[in-house]
């Protein structure tokens, strides 16, 4: 974890093999198709659409750790690294996939998520 302490991030290039990555991409594509074709339950994900797209261009999908990426978020190899960095237990509070293409659509304004998570979701501290 020396690299993390010095740089504030970690790179784990061998953490997900190409086949597993392809599986995640296929799962996500199926969810995107289901949302756009109105065959995925609307309460399963919180979806943000690009303004003005009439719900045809997805900007973000929230709660992806509950199914699409569940096995990744619960992977012991990842959790042991996170626990070492935090020096405590860890959990996934929120997850999302941002699908907005670079330099297209309306940008994400600067904001702090903690206040909302604290009030609405009960997140104890940042």
Image (cartoon, rainbow, N blue to C red):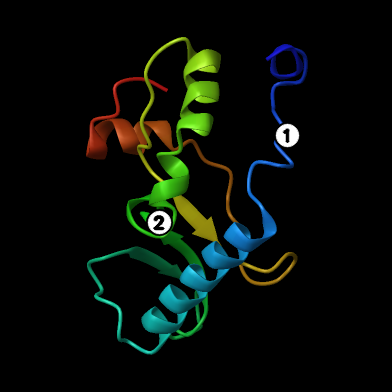
Q: Position of residue 74 (x, y in %)?
A: 40, 39
The residue shown at (44%, 86%) is 54
Residue placed most toward the observer, 94 or 23: 23
Residue 50 in view, yes or no:
no
Tell me whether circle 2 and circle 1 mark residues in contact (CB < 8 Å): no
Q: CA distance from mark 2 to mark 1?
A: 22 Å
Mark 2 vs mark 1: give the one in front.
1
- Under tag 2, what secondary structure? helix
The residue that label 1 is drawn on is: 11
The residue shown at (30%, 78%) is 40
The residue shown at (47%, 18%) is 83
103 left or right of 123 in image: right
Q: Position of residue 68 (x, y in %)?
A: 41, 60
- Under tag 1, what secondary structure? loop
110 left or right of 1 in image: left
The residue shown at (40%, 56%) is 64
Q: Toward which corner of the image does residue 1 lie, by quadrant?
A: top right
Residue 84 in view, yes or no:
yes
Q: Residues within 10 Å of mark 1 (few under 14, many from 20)?
A: few
- Disc 2 or 1, which lies upstream in sequence? 1
Q: Position of residue 66 (x, y in %)?
A: 32, 52
- Quarter the C terminus occupies: top left
1 left or right of 62 in image: right
Q: Position of residue 115 (x, y in %)?
A: 36, 32
The residue that label 2 is drawn on is: 64
Residue 93 vs 26, above or below: the answer is: above
Residue 52 vs 72, above or below: the answer is: below
């Amino acid at each position: 974890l020396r690299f993390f302490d010095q740089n504030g991030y970690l790179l784990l290039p061998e953490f997900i093999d190409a086949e597993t990555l392809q599986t995640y991409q296929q799962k996500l594509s199926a969810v995107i198709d289901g949302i756009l074709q109105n065959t995925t339950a609307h309460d399963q994900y919180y979806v943000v659409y690009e303004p003005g797209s009439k719900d045809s261009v997805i900007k973000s999908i929230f709660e992806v750790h509950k199914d699409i990426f569940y096995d990744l978020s619960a992977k012991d190899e990842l959790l042991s690294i996170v626990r070492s960095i935090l020096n405590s237990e860890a959990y996934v509070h929120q997850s999302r996939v941002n699908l907005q293409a670079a330099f297209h659509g309306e940008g994400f304004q600067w904001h702090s998520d903690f206040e909302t998570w604290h009030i609405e979701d009960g997140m104890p501290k940042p």
